[in-house]
Amino acid sequence: MARRRDQVLDAGIQVLGSEGARRLTYQAVDAAAGVPSGTTSNYFRNRTALIDGIVDHLQVLERRDWEGFAAAANPADAGELADTVTRFLVYAAGPERARTAARFALYLEAIARPELRPTLTRGRETVVDWGAEWLQRFGSPDPRRHCEILFDYMDGVAFHQLAFPVDGFDPGPGIRELLRGLLG
């Protein structure tokens, strides 16, 4: 049963991220999930419940991805940190572009539904904690604030790549320049 629910939520993320919030319907999610008509509505009684489920599921998936990147990376210096961040951005704007677009769509949804903000914020705070540790290790005088600046920049770069895709997307030079400025 949990597997089917996750299948529906994965499909909801794909629909939201590839077709936009207006196309997020029970029928679209059922079709994307390849499940019988009505399956999504069995798990989520209204659109609000579906969006809440997607928010929670997205946080789990993104946390898992970030933990994977963080565990595989043990940057020895700011250059290696820039490489790690670059790889993550290329992944987020490439293979996981629909998921990243879904996250941005949920940010917009949070404008009208402030109750989504705590969950979305909690996911970001976890990642900021990890990033701040790295920045502190490399000499940042204000690691938490610098990590927030870095992540704001990363969100902007990812958003721009999603909206205006560039072949050969390489955020590395900008990431390196930003880290040099933050770390002195």
Image: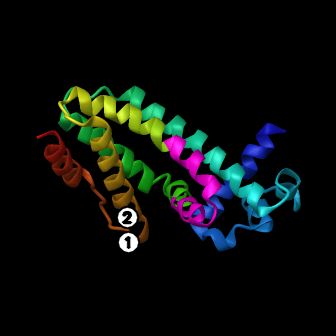
Dividing the image into 4 quarters, which one contains the N terminus? Answer: top right
Please rate how many residues cluster around mark 1, counting C-alpha atoms within 10 Å: few if below 14, some from 14 to 19, many from 20.
few
Please state which amino acid type lies under the numbered disc 1: Phe
Q: CA distance from mark 2 to mark 1?
A: 5 Å
Q: Nearer the viewer, residue 8 or 146?
A: 146
* Residue to which mark 2 is pinned: 161
Residue drawn at (32%, 28%) of the image: 133
Res. 135 in view: yes
Q: Quadrant of residue 146?
A: top left
Query: Quick one: SS at disc 1?
Result: loop
Q: Is residue 23 above or below residue 31?
A: below
Whether the magenta-drawn stretch holds residue 116 is answered as yes
Whether the magenta-drawn stretch holds residue 119 is answered as yes
Picture coordinates of residue 128, whole percent (x, y): 40, 38
Q: Quadrant of residue 79?
A: top left
**Which secondary structure class fits the magenta region best?**
helix
Q: Nearer the viewer, residue 107 or 79?
A: 107
In the image, taking residue 23 as reference, residue 165 lies left or right, namely left
Magenta stretch, residue numbers: 104-123
Does the residue at mark 2 contact the one at mark 1 (Cβ under 8 Å)? Answer: yes
